Image: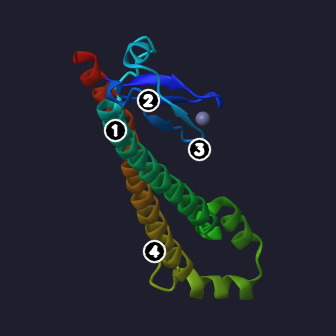
Amino acid sequence: MNYLLPCTCGQKIPIEPRRAGETVQCPCGLTQQAPTLREIRQLPRAVDESPPAARREVAWGARQRLLMAGTIVVVIAVVLALLIAQLRPSAPYSVAKPELMAAKVRASSLVDSVRFYHRYLEPGLERGISPEEQDYARKREQFQIGMVVLGVLGAFGLALMLLGIAGVGSRALDLNRK
Ligand SMILES: [Zn+2]
């Protein structure tokens, strides 16, 4: 059991009773003579907390690492999602506004209509899928896959964060049980 010997600097030097009469040094550098054994025993006792404190430090470190890793993963997922959102493909005219397109066709000249026919209706009298629409479908699929991947990544990061928080909870229960 250590006792706390006050230094003039305000710190308290933990000393063992067997050091009575010896010269002890404070972390501040000042030295002083330790009092007698009897006087030492009247000093406030140092609460020996080093093992639990060390354990708590380890637990805290693990929790912080989980929280940190989770936060980094979530931030990366969010930033990537925001960047990819900028690349979201826009629907071609024929997909986004079919009624406007129909109106445009009705109002177009014969030459325009023939051009339109070649572009969109060539596969047959049924309206086919235009190159723009194929391109859009492919890009939209890539976009959706990217968003799903980032969603999974973000969920993984959140899980890490929750594990970090839950880890503290279970350790707090452990300490309470002791
Ligand atoms: Zn001191």
At horizontal 49% and vertical 31% (from top left) the residue drawn is 13
Question: Does dot 1 land on a helix, a strand or a loop?
Answer: helix
Amino acid under disc 3: Gly
Callout 1 crowding tier (Cα within 10 Å): few <14, some 14–19, many ≥20: few
At horizontal 41% and vertical 29% (from top left) the residue drawn is 15
Residue 162, disc:
none
Looking at the image, is 22 positioned above or below residue 172? below
Amino acid under disc 4: Arg
First in sequence, mark 4 or 2: give its number: 2
Which of the pair 9/161 is nearer the observer?
9
First in sequence, mark 4 or 3: give its number: 3
Amino acid under disc 1: Ala
Asked if the beta carbon under badge 4 is closer than 8 A to the nearest atom of ligand 1, the reply is no
Residue 24 position, x and y percent, is 48, 36
Quadrant of ligand 1 in image = top right
Which of the pair 102/20 is nearer the observer?
20
At horizontal 28% and vertical 28% (from top left) the residue drawn is 170
Residue beneath disc 2: 14
| Residue 20 sits in quarter | top left
Amino acid under disc 2: Pro
First in sequence, mark 3 or 2: give its number: 2
Residue 171 position, x and y percent, is 29, 29
Mark-to-mark CA distance, 4 and 3 = 72 Å
Residue 54, disc:
1
Residue beneath disc 4: 138
Q: Are marks 4 and 3 in contact (CB under 8 Å)?
A: no
- In this rendering, would 133 be left or right of 107? left
Mark-to-mark CA distance, 4 and 2 = 72 Å
Asked if the beta carbon under badge 3 is closer than 8 A to the nearest atom of ligand 1, the reply is yes
